[in-house]
């Protein structure tokens, strides 16, 4: 077993905040994608129906990379730790992709850079979550994971609001390059590139990984890292998957299908709802509106994540998460019917509450039911519960976008809302996580 609860030093709130600071840069990057990739694709000539296919990078790279990286990080031995090498490689690649993205001269370039960006984020993401599970005991894990959720809300608030902030200080929102990409977008991505690397460097410097004992090192080296052992670890982990984790699969499918619908079509839906148009000028205005709305719901998520810490301890993670999913689903069903920006902020309360829970609460449910020595691989497998619904949505939506949804992006948002409501019902079926089992590595 990698480190039992008794052997892990309790961390102060300040140290927990510092260890999760890297999530600020990581989630600023995700926020830039959510708020700007749809408009960038639109500026470069993509059709509405093709949007899901252009977003395939995230689910496919997550499906391929995160379980592999999670398994490898469980067995990686370096002077700087098991997880840290993956943080650093991912952060450098992410910074490069963010700098380059808004200078894309063609649709295929932007799509290719999104593949690199998502691969880099996925290299970082699950080792980072495993690092929190490694570093904190069971009592402090809710605070650790919901601190990540709070940083998600703060980072994405800043990412969504950045273009509007630049306009408020005097930049011209209609100043664009030859490809139609606004100057304010390029500046936001440059800031994201700096944050992605600098915040992760700070976290691993200030709160390094716990050293492994000689016994733990010997156990890891008995089964050296290789393609064969990685595949065997993956197969064994799937076979031994705890029942609560299996039960979470349906809820995860519904909620992430719904969120991908929202991210892909929020700007286009707002353009229709506010301007009854999908023209470039309407999309540019809707992008700024979506930035303000996204900043607001992420600010709500930041505050809600702090409130969820005592609530999950008192009421349990499952009921709290179900209530948050119901709030988000109701908000998505209502939002496309609103034709005034001021009233759009009301459903953002529900979306913010749901987003706060999405980024923390399921990981509390997961971390308490998996064996400590398999944290990395189970975090990677759990990410498959996120990327598979994204993949299904991206591959199927283009086929029923027009015949079933009438070619109207507002109907996609409503579909997302219905899926979030189903996620709430599915969450209520998940049993209480049992104590983590100790499963020795097979030789």
Image (spheres, grey):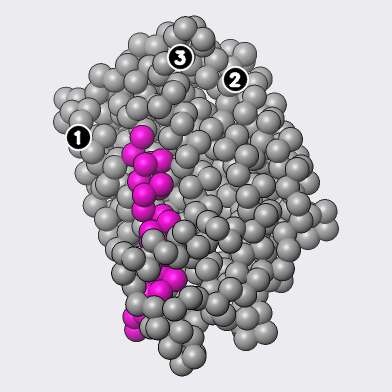
Q: Does residue 331 appear anywhere in the picture? A: no
- Range of the magenta residues? 56-82
Residue appearing at x 55%, y 15% in the figure: 411
Per the image, the residue denoted by label 1 is 109
Q: Does residue 110 appear anywhere in the picture? A: yes
Q: Quadrant of residue 85?
A: bottom left
- Gap between marks 3 and 1, in whole Å? 25 Å
Residue 78 among those drawn in magenta: yes
Q: Quadrant of residue 3?
A: bottom right
Q: Earlier in the sequence, mark 1 or mark 2?
A: 1
Q: What percent of the width, then of the height, locates residue 125?
A: 44, 57
Front-lying residue, 177 or 217: 217
Q: What percent of the width, then of the height, locates residue 430?
A: 73, 47
Residue 195 among those drawn in magenta: no
Front-lying residue, 121 or 389: 389
- Gap between marks 1 and 2, in whole Å? 31 Å
The answer to whether 255 appears left or right of 379 in the picture is right
Per the image, the residue denoted by label 2 is 414
Other-residue count near label 3 (Cα within 10 Å), few / some / many at <14 / 14–19 / ≥20: some
Disc 1 + disc 2, Cβ < 8 Å:
no
Q: What percent of the width, then of the height, locates residue 73?
A: 40, 69
**Which secondary structure is most common in the magenta stretch?**
helix
The answer to whether 60 appears left or right of 322 in the picture is left
Q: Earlier in the sequence, mark 3 or mark 1?
A: 1
Helix, strand or loop at label 3? It is loop
Residue that sits furthest to the right in the current view: 314
Q: Quadrant of residue 6?
A: bottom right
Helix, strand or loop at label 2? It is helix
Other-residue count near label 2 (Cα within 10 Å), few / some / many at <14 / 14–19 / ≥20: many
Helix, strand or loop at label 1? It is helix
Residue appearing at x 25%, y 41% in the figure: 113
């Amino acid at each position: 077993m990698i480190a039992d609860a008794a052997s892990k030093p309790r961390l102060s709130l300040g140290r927990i905040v510092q260890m999760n600071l890297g999530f600020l840069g990581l989630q600023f990057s995700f926020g830039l994608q959510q708020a700007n990739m749809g408009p960038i694709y639109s500026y470069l000539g993509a059709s509405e129906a093709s949007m899901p296919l252009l977003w395939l990078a995230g689910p496919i790279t997550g499906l391929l990379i995160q379980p592999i990286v999670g398994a490898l990080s469980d067995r990686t031995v370096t002077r700087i730790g098991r997880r840290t090498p993956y943080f650093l490689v991912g952060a450098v690649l992410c910074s490069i992709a963010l700098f380059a993205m808004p200078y894309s001269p063609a649709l295929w370039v932007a799509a290719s850079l999104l593949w690199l960006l998502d691969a880099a984020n996925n290299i970082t993401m699950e080792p980072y979550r495993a690092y929190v599970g490694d570093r904190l005991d069971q009592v402090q894990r809710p605070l650790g994971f919901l601190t990540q959720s709070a940083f998600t809300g703060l980072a994405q608030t800043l990412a969504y609001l950045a273009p509007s902030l630049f306009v408020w200080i005097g930049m011209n929102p209609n100043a664009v390059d030859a490809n139609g990409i606004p100057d304010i977008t390029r500046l936001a991505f440059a800031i994201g590139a700096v944050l992605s690397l600098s915040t992760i460097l700070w976290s691993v410097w200030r709160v390094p990984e716990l050293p492994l004992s000689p016994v733990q090192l010997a156990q890891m080296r008995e089964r050296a890292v290789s393609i064969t052992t990685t595949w065997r670890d993956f197969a064994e982990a799937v076979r031994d998957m705890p029942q609560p984790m299996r039960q979470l699969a349906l809820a995860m499918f519904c909620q992430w299908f719904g969120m991908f619908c929202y991210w892909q079509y929020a700007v286009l839906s707002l353009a229709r709802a506010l301007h009854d148009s999908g023209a470039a000028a309407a999309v540019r205005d809707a992008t700024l509106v979506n930035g303000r709305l996204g900043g607001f719901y992420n600010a709500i998520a930041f505050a809600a994540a702090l409130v969820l810490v005592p609530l999950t301890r008192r009421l349990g993670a499952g009921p709290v998460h179900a209530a948050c999913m119901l709030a988000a689903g109701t908000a998505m069903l209502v939002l496309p019917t609103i034709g005034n920006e001021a009233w759009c902020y009301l459903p953002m309360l529900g979306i913010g509450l749901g987003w706060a829970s999405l980024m923390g609460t399921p990981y509390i449910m997961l971390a308490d039911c998996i064996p400590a020595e398999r944290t990395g691989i189970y975090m990677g497998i759990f990410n498959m519960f996120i990327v598979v619904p994204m993949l299904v949505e991206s591959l199927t939506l283009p086929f029923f976008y027009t015949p079933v949804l009438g070619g109207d992006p507002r109907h996609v948002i409503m579909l997302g809302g219905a899926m979030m409501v189903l996620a709430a019902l599915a969450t209520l079926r998940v049993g209480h996580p049992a104590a983590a089992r100790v499963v020795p590595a097979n030789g």
